[in-house]
Amino acid sequence: MSLPQIVIVGRPNVGKSSLFNWLAGRRLAIVDNVAGVTRDRMTYLMQWRERYFEIVDTGGIGVNDVDDLTDEIEQQIAIAIDSADLILFVVDTREGILPLDQEVARRLRHVNKPIVLVANKTDEQHMDHDADQFYQLGRGKLVPVSTLQNRNKDDLLNVIADRLPDAEEGEQTGEPEMKIAVVGRRNVGKSTFVNTLARAERMIVSEVAGTTRDSVDIRFELDGKSFTAIDTPGLRRRVSVKTDVDFYSTHRAERSIRRADVVLMFFDASQQISKVDKQLIAYIAENYKPVVFVVNKWDLYHDKMPTDRWATYLHDTFRNIPYAPVAFITGQTGKNVKALLNHAQMLFKQSLERITTGELNRIVRFAIEKTPPPLYKLRRPKIYFATQIGAQPPTIVLKCNSPKAFSDGYRRYLLSMIRDHVSFSEVPIKLYLHRRQEADFKGDAQSGDTEEPQDSDSGNAAVSDLLNESKDE
């Protein structure tokens, strides 16, 4: 299963970013009294009670952004809530219940996910009674905390851990049904392709660009196996999104990518790669989705550019995902469609795979022996052991003595070496480096190394350093 996501929401200035930094043990999010400082989501990997999870900071709900980015902030919040496994609803004990708190509670009323009500700025024990007023909001267990006074941090983390989905949850008996998102810019043949899959005219197919205005799920069977294809609206350049229909079409296409197990990214064989294609690929990579580059209408243009040149053109353009396979099809006649679906199913299975800790450590040890990490402050940084902590996407943590000692280039090298030796080489991989804690003595990727972690943050055993995810992903 994928890592649980713990999303922090609330009105502006209740201390969401302070809570994010406090839980992470590092100053990652900007903290300011000016409403609207946090716009994009921020994510940080944490470990508590032998469970890994990601905490996600969001912008304030209801903020009127000075740069007129309110819609974008609201969209980021909606995305975070949509992907959350647990929600931290943050309120301010000093100010009490405000209308915007009630608005946040209203937005969360129909969210069928665990919610913890975090009463921040409860600086003293006697203020716990003041926090009880938030029970009126009727949302989740109440935990009074103070990021300023460092109150009840362990209590909050324990409540979070108790409400995480079970580690085994999501494991299914039998073979799961794969969801495929069919995406691309306008008029590249997505709906024609879906019609071929369904063997019926389920989509409106037209030469007028932008006919599909909403994402539509089509269920079909192939060789006795069930699939769901999500047909999406063709996207325009962001500067061309002028109407509500265009805005919501873009939003739904992005949501379809997030829902999908595998993304089929369509290109027209007669057209060059566009800025819209690059925006879509960036969004797919950002969400760690397995993707197949699909060159459609190949029967009409195969004599003008051979397949190897098209594949090179695609991989040269999208260097951040060199592992993505390329398929050449004719959606209207169904040529090569079955082979494409078989490959998509293979990617789906790869995204669910796990590698044993022993095998992963052998790969990492081999990579270190082949090319040791560069010196950092005249010392060689150490990796002690590696383990896979999640799937969809495969997520790997390397325990080390000092994450900041490993350069971006060496992280990319490690990821490349792992990818070359695992069975899930064609799907995105999340790679984190964490400082090893006292409870992590499990044997080392570098033989015989049992040295205590260096440069550790004193007084906070639960805090780990998170490396930026490799740009190869």
Image: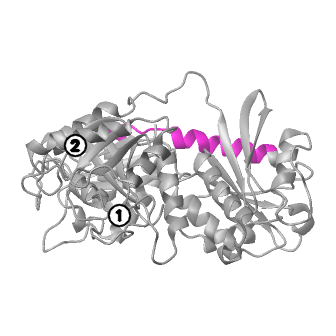
Q: Which residues are magenta?
A: 338-359
Q: Position of residue 386 (x, y in %)?
A: 30, 47
Name the residue located 36 percent from the left edge and 69 percent from the top edge: 35
Q: Amino acid at mark 1?
A: Asn
Residue 435 lies, in percent from the top left, at 20, 54
Residue 372 image-quadrant placement: bottom left
- Within the magenta stretch, is there residue 187? no
Q: Is residue 358 magenta?
A: yes
Instruction: Tell me: residue 198, above or below residue 364.
Output: above
Residue at the far top in the pictured view = 173
Q: Residue at x 67, y 64 (%)?
A: 247
> Label 2, on which residue?
131
Q: Quadrant of residue 412?
A: bottom left
Q: Is residue 130 left or right of residue 396?
A: left
Residue to which mark 1 is pinned: 468
Left or right: residue 179 compared with residue 125: right
> Could you say whether the residue bearing mark 1 is in a helix, strand or loop?
loop
Mark 1 vs 2, N-terminal side: 2
Q: Amino acid at mark 2?
A: Ala
Q: Is residue 157 above or below residue 58?
A: above
Q: Secondary structure at mark 2?
A: helix
